[in-house]
Amino acid sequence: MIIKLFFKFSKKIYILTFILKLNNIWAINMRTSNPALSNDTFTGFNTYGQNQMTINGTVNNTIISLGIVSICAYFSWDVLFFSSYSGILMLITPILGFVMALATIFKKEWAPATVPIYCIFEGLFLGLISGFFELMYPGIIFQAVIATFGVLFSLLFAYKSKLIRATENFKLGIVAATGGIALVYIVSLLLGLFGIPIPLIFGSGPVGIIFSLFVVIIAALNLVLDFDFIEQGEKYGAPKYMEWYGAFGLMVTLIWLYLEILKLLAKLRSRN
């Protein structure tokens, strides 16, 4: 019961992080979609004479970020999980991650420093929460990780092969759907303060599974917005530090996707 409360609390914090990131990327995309804007208006900074953002640089930083998250997750699962303070760590690590996310979103030039720290806190949290899910449903973490990266590479292939295009209508639809999901989570949090649950969509019944599947699909499609953001950043000559911001965007989406897949699998396993 306590673990479920920690998980629900951390997800509310995480969806706030995601909405802030999404809103920031959406605003930038809206500016760059105007062909009258010059290259140095991508983030409102003039990059003349400076190193500029590249896709390869963003990929490298994303790999580094994934490595940090993976190492910290393994450490927290292997070392901290059975400690007496695992509960408090599960509570404070998403809060500290949220603080680092805010710093990254509102001070993008700090991204080379704040993103690795963000990944440390998120990795520690993911290791702890994954450990608890693995205790309840053995093998579920392997399934969730494989599914998450399977979705990532499938959508990357679809994006690069133009099977999915980040049109303005597509972006608007994904942003609207994500905002709707955030609203549901926020309302559930507020109702929870008064002891009023929302049993159907958060339960393991058919409605709850359909809702989780919908959230997984929307989380996955947000990757397309991240791919487009990175591509636009290179096209419009964004500053070099935006490579870290692009990696941050991908990490936020991937972690959200992983958590939602984990939740969906847990619902399915609980029915057996």
Image (tube, rainbow, N blue to C red):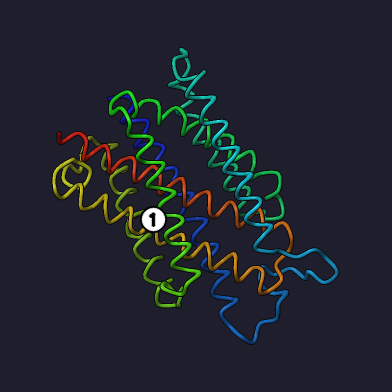
In the depicted structure, whether residue 59 falls above or below residue 27: above
Quadrant for the N terminus, please.
top left
Quadrant for the C terminus, please.
top left
Is 234 or 12 nearer to us in this picture? 234
Q: Is residue 205 left or right of residue 156?
A: left
Q: Is residue 127 left or right of residue 214?
A: right
What is the x, y in percent for residue 39? Answer: 71, 77
What is the x, y in percent for residue 223? Answer: 46, 59
Residue type at mark 1?
A: Ala
What is the x, y in percent for residue 190? Answer: 31, 43
In the depicted structure, whether residue 263 falls above or below residue 52: above
Q: Residues within 10 Å of mark 1 (few under 14, many from 20)?
A: many
Residue on which the image places disc 1? 219
Residue drawn 41% across the image and 41% down it: 145
Residue drawn 58% across the image and 83% down it: 34
Q: Residue furthest top?
A: 84
Q: Residue furthest right?
A: 49
Q: Is residue 63 left or right of residue 130?
A: right
What is the x, y in percent for residue 75? Answer: 54, 24
Residue drawn 37% across the image and 59% down it: 178
| SS at badge 1 | helix
Is 15 or 138 nearer to us in this picture? 138
